[in-house]
Amino acid sequence: MNGLTGATEPESRLKELEGFIFTILKLVIEPIQKQAKGFRHIASQLEEKIIIDYSIEFITSLNVHDFKQISSQDLYKILVVRRAGKISDRTTKYHKLISRINYLRTIESSMYDIMNNFQPIFEQYQNEWNDSIKKIDSFFIEIRTQDAQTNFEQRRKDFLNDFDKVVSNWQNLPSIMLVPDMNIRDRYVLYDNLVIPLRNIARKYEGDDWAMNLMNIILDCVHYYEKIEHLKKFTSSSFSNLATKLADAFEEIKSFIEDNGDMIN
């Protein structure tokens, strides 16, 4: 490719470069669409209340690095000087196209930056959520042990009965019965059917030591749940932004190809 980079060779060299540029751009049109679709897909997954492993693939054919082999002087000659129309319009289109191409060079690193920022923090929050859920189990064992050893007043017995009902209702959910291992760890099933009902119990028996201890545990659960959801939403927005910018690049490059079909003639 060394023969493609000089600026003093004859007209035939610039003509050859025109075809080279046009070919690169045609080859990245489909990969741009596939990559944008992938970004929109993971953005949508992150918005959903589902438990899955998040992953994204980089489309390796989305490659414009060969543009580095062409000097800026040659690019300007081919994309501005040799094109028809007003110089101001051609220059504007040139800068837009080069801006899109430069952006495409950053897509892979941007994608991995987002995932590398998301995954360790998501894992940390998930572990903290799991720890807070385990505290509910420990609390349940503790008050049950006390119940076996102490003749509680009616209010405490009512607390235990309400607590038992919430746990029983959660354990007997159709989804839990059908797929127990999956749904016991399902954050959304836990949050809607265990955490929130237990928060209501803590509020109902406000002022009681058990209720206060339970509320502290529940507040931890809610805190980490909300942190996870905020992180997911932020990451979804980041991928949506990448998809939007890729769509803009697609339109710019597609328009350039359509406007400059004579480059392959």
Image: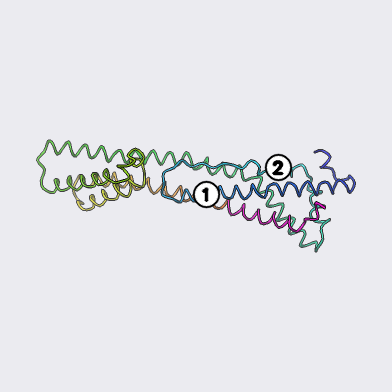
Label at residue 3: none
Q: Residue furthest right?
A: 10
Mark 1, other Cα within 10 Å: few <14 / some 14–19 / many ≥20: some
The kind of secondary structure element at disc 1 is helix
The colour scheme used to paint the residues is: rainbow
Q: Specify the principal SS of the magenta part.
A: helix
Mark 2, other Cα within 10 Å: few <14 / some 14–19 / many ≥20: few
Tally of marks: 2
The residue carrying mark 1 is 41
The residue carrying mark 2 is 65
Q: Nearer the viewer, mark 1 or mark 2?
A: 1
Q: Residue at x 62, y 50 (%)?
A: 33
Q: Tell me which numbered mark, 1 or 2, is placed earlier along the sequence.
A: 1
The kind of secondary structure element at disc 2 is helix
The N terminus appears in which quarter of the rendering? top right
Image position of 207 (left or right of 151) = right
Q: Residue at x 66, y 42 (%)?
A: 61
Task: Give the spatial CA distance, label 1 vs label 2.
Answer: 26 Å
Q: Residue furthest bottom?
A: 86
Please say whether residue 262 is one of the residues in the magenta stretch.
Answer: yes
Relative image position of residue 3 (x, y in whole percent): 84, 40
Please say whether residue 258 is one of the residues in the magenta stretch.
Answer: yes
Relative image position of residue 150 (x, y in whole percent): 11, 38
Looking at the rendering, which quadrant does residue 170 occupy? top left
Relative image position of residue 146 (x, y in whole percent): 16, 37
Q: Residue at x 12, y 35 (%)?
A: 149
The amino acid type of the residue labelled 1 equals His
Range shown magenta: 243-265
Q: Are marks 1 and 2 in contact (CB under 8 Å)?
A: no
Question: Quick one: 177 or 84, which is closer to the camera?
Answer: 177
The amino acid type of the residue labelled 2 equals His
Relative image position of residue 255 (x, y in whole percent): 71, 58
